[in-house]
Amino acid sequence: MIINNRVLFLHIPHTGGRFVSHNIQKNQNCIHHNFTREVKGVEIEHLNMFDSNYLYGSSKMFETFTIVRNPIDRFIGCLRHCNKLNLKAIKYMFENETNFFNTVNKLRESKTQNWFEPQINFIEHDTKIWRFENGLEEKFRKWIMNNFKLKLEKPTDHELKTFKHKSDYNQVFDLKQKQKQYIKDYYFLDYKIFNYN
């Protein structure tokens, strides 16, 4: 999402980006692509860095920022919204690491809105990074102001409720430690680069 002629928000799916996009759009006179336009089968808002550079010419024209999230929590969030997998397919995926890697690779090939793309594929070395776990309210608004001179107003109770409702899930996943390790192994660079444990 291009905010102005100098700032670009790189929206990694399932990291609170719709909530942030809404607040930025509400507070800034920004160029905003809605979630119905696609490039190569992926919503413009969810393009990885390679495809974002393809669309915009180069992200180097902008100061960039993004939000990252613990890979296990993000993966579970993606699973809960994914309509390409039923419970039987999810059970098969978590039977062993080979099944897990093969299934995730197929999901990535199917362009499921880049949901299962590693987070590192959305950033470049000079992208400023905020952690989802640090919250998206007052501290985040101060960080945006200090780094980009963008003022964001406090969201209304209605907005908080609306976006919280969108993150409610129908399915609950109780993963064993071994299954969580599959996620850690697949997204090992996200763990390393973003210092998650």
Image (cartoon, rainbow, N blue to C red):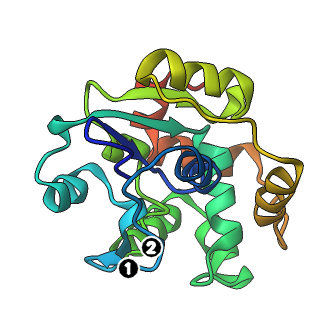
Q: How many marks?
A: 2
Mark carried by residue 165:
none
Q: Is residue 180 visible?
A: no
What crowding class fits label 2: few (fewer than 14 Cα within 10 Å), some (14-19), or many (20 or more)?
some
> Most extreme residue toward the front, as rendered?
29
Q: 44 and 48: which one is in front? A: 44
Q: Position of residue 40 (x, y in %)?
A: 25, 77
Q: Is residue 30 visible?
A: yes
Q: Which corner quadrant of the image does residue 147 belong to? A: top left
Three-letter amino acid code at disc 2?
Leu
Write the residue at 62% across / 83% down: 83
Q: Position of residue 157 (x, y in %)?
A: 88, 49
Q: Is 45 on the left-hand or right-hand side of 175?
A: left
Q: Is 81 on the left-hand or right-hand side of 127?
A: right
Q: Position of residue 1 (x, y in %)?
A: 39, 53
Three-letter amino acid code at disc 1?
Ser
Write the residue at 54% across / 41% down: 184
> Most extreme residue toward the left, as rendered?
57
Secondary element under disc 1, as helix, strand or loop, is loop
Q: What residue is disc 1 on? A: 110
Write the residue at 49% across / 63% down: 115
What crowding class fits label 1: few (fewer than 14 Cα within 10 Å), some (14-19), or many (20 or more)?
few
Q: 185 and 74: which one is in front? A: 74
Q: 33 and 100: which one is in front? A: 33
Q: What residue is disc 2 on? A: 107
Q: Position of residue 55 (x, y in %)?
A: 18, 62
Q: CB atoms at circles 2 and 1 under 8 Å apart?
A: yes
Q: How far separated are the C-alphas under marks 2 and 1?
A: 5 Å
Q: Is 12 on the left-hand or right-hand side of 20?
A: left
